Amino acid sequence: MSVEKQRTDVASNWLRSIRMVAWGFFGVRKRSEFEEDVRIHPLQIVLVGLVAVFVLVIALVALVHWVAG
């Protein structure tokens, strides 16, 4: 397998993880996508989930500061 192919696969897995976590926040998942996402490493999902929660909390704090003045 070429180095370029490996990089593309890694980037694709991270993008898929981000999409999976984003849809998971809304609670909407298709069964076909779930079956396809089984190939993603669980550690990737945990890391993306933690980053997403951190970004959400920071965004909410910023929004509250902006609204409160």
Image (cartoon, rainbow, N blue to C red):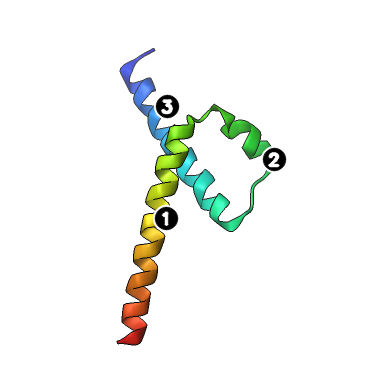
Callout 3 touching callout 2 (CB < 8 Å):
no
Q: Secondary structure at mark 2?
A: helix
Q: Nearer the N terminus, badge 3 or badge 1?
A: 3
Question: Which residue is more in the foreground, 18 or 1?
Answer: 18
Quick one: which residue is furthest to the right in this view?
31
Q: Which residue is mark 3?
A: 9
Question: Would residue 40 appear left or right of 54 to someone viewing this image?
Answer: right
Look at 41% across and 61% down and name the residue there.
Answer: 56
Amino acid at dot 1: Val
Q: How many marks?
A: 3
Position of residue 6 measured from the top left corner of the image (x, y, whole percent): 37, 21
The quarter of the picture where residue 39 lies is top right
Name which residue type carries label 2. Arg
Q: Residue at x 45, y 47 (%)?
A: 49
Residue named by callout 1:
53
Question: Which residue position holds label 2?
Answer: 31
Image quarter of the N terminus: top left
Q: Give the Cα distance between marks 3 and 2.
A: 22 Å
Residue 13 versus residue 4: which sits nearer the camera?
Answer: 13
| Above-or-below relation of 12 to 67 | above
Q: Is residue 4 left or right of residue 22?
A: left
Of the residues under marks 3 and 2, which one precedes in the sequence? 3
Which residue is at a point 39% across and 70% down the rendered structure image? 60
